[in-house]
Amino acid sequence: MGIEKLFNDSLKGESGELLRTINSLGRNLKEKEIKKALAGQDLHLTLDLKLQKLAEKHFPETKKGAFILMDSFSGALKVIVSRPSFNPNIFLDSIISNDWKKIQETQPFINRAFDSCYPPASIFKLITVSAALEEKIITQDSTWNCKGFFRFGKSNLRCRAKHGSLTTELAVAHSCNILFYEIGKRMNIDTLAHYAHTFGLGKKTNILFSEKKGLIPTYNWKIEYKGERWWKGETLSVAIGQSFLLTTPIQIARMVASIASGSLVNPRILEKETIIKQPLKISEKTRAFLNQSMRTASTEGTGKRLNNIENLTIFAKTGSAQTSELSKRKLGDKYLEHGWFVANIFYKNEKPITLVVIVENAGGSRIPVNITKKFLIEYSKLMQDEERKNS
């Protein structure tokens, strides 16, 4: 699988050939090399073994999901974890049918970092607010009053809390739904889809591995695939990252990295791969606002549990992706929300790294935040140790 399968021909090298002359007793009389053996080529990966082991240590083996750590500017992947994993030694012997069925129950052969799709939930709000600012539907100085619900038609659409009066920045930092329902009410779905594509969603990232494309719904998509028109209420659902939206963790990593770097960079796993990136086509003013909102989310918003890790400055966003009707939550874990945590992280004055953690059916963002916190505490210590060694 993976790298070894993709580069098998260059890794295995070529066998040599010897011509031997032997007598009737099998004694070797002479030997001549007629073809030299060629060693396989080395592949140098961007993965950091220490950080990879650290991420695997802190991502519970009992949970499903993915963990990605990527250089925000170069796209170099430092960590890729997909849970659940499997022991490749199981294929050394034959596997009986019942054991094979049991292994398949948790779908361990899917690389969830690249090949699984999830609703982006509140991570998508970064795109929604970007679209609204770029289209001048709202301003950074606007204020919003959250009463815990938003009236749309005959329905009351809920928010996770009664936030009261909030600026646009605080609404993003606290992930208040009211701002985004209001944007969805004022914006059409195709405009929102345009900005999702601008941030690289609904497109493959061009990583070497198999990857899903995801789904960014549009007016015409629904007519073609669902056979019915697009309803305005559905735009409000998309605005908070739900409805038909589907993204992969690697797409989200690319999107989040672009907020820090100003470019959409192709993720890469080989050191020799060319760095390919393109400018993020939003204004610097909007990008600066996104960074400030993510910083505020880390200091006083939904990501504040990570605010005091030594030597780290964190720009974060959390998300809880609904998987079923809320009334079914008590029926079992499979009905719980997927939990997201994403961030751009600066160690002292160094360039940022982008982190994405998603845990399936976690019930919210608490579990991915806890995984991240444990990882980053040890990451900071590792970085300090490296500094001491090099000083």
Image (cartoon, rainbow, N blue to C red):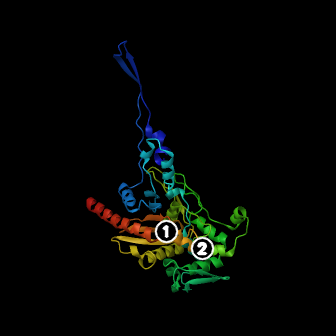
Q: Nearer the viewer, residue 235 or 326?
A: 326
Whether residue 366 is situated above or below residue 51 in the rendered picture: below
Residue at (42, 59) in percent of width and height: 61
Residue 239 tag number: 2
Which residue is depicted at the point 50% across and 80% down?
Answer: 169
Secondary structure, mark 2, is helix
Residue 348 placement (x, y as % from top left): 35, 69
Quadrant placement of the C terminus: bottom left
Badge number at residue 231 = none
The quadrant where residue 248 appears? bottom right
The mark lying in front, picked from 1 and 2, is: 1
Dot 1: within a 10 Å radius of its alpha carbon, few (fewer than 14), some, or many (20 or more) residues? many
Q: Is residue 283 visible?
A: no
Spatial separation of the CA atoms under disc 1 and disc 2: 18 Å
Residue 318, given in percent of the width and then of the height, sits at 48, 72
Residue 241's place in the image compared with 138, above or below, is above
Residue nearest the observer in this picture, 56 or 196:
56
Q: Position of residue 37 (x, y in %)?
A: 41, 31
Up-down: is 182 above or below 243? Answer: below
Q: Are marks 1 and 2 in contact (CB under 8 Å)?
A: no
Compared to 31, does 160 lie above or below?
A: below
Figure disc tally: 2
Dot 2: few (<14), some (14–19), or many (≥20) neighbours within 10 Å?
many
Q: What x and y, as percent, mark residue 247?
A: 56, 63
Q: Is residue 384 visible?
A: yes
The amino acid sitting under disc 1 is Gly
Task: Give the structural element (helix, strand or loop) at label 1.
Answer: strand
Mark 2 belongs to which amino acid?
Answer: Ala
Which residue is under mark 1?
A: 339
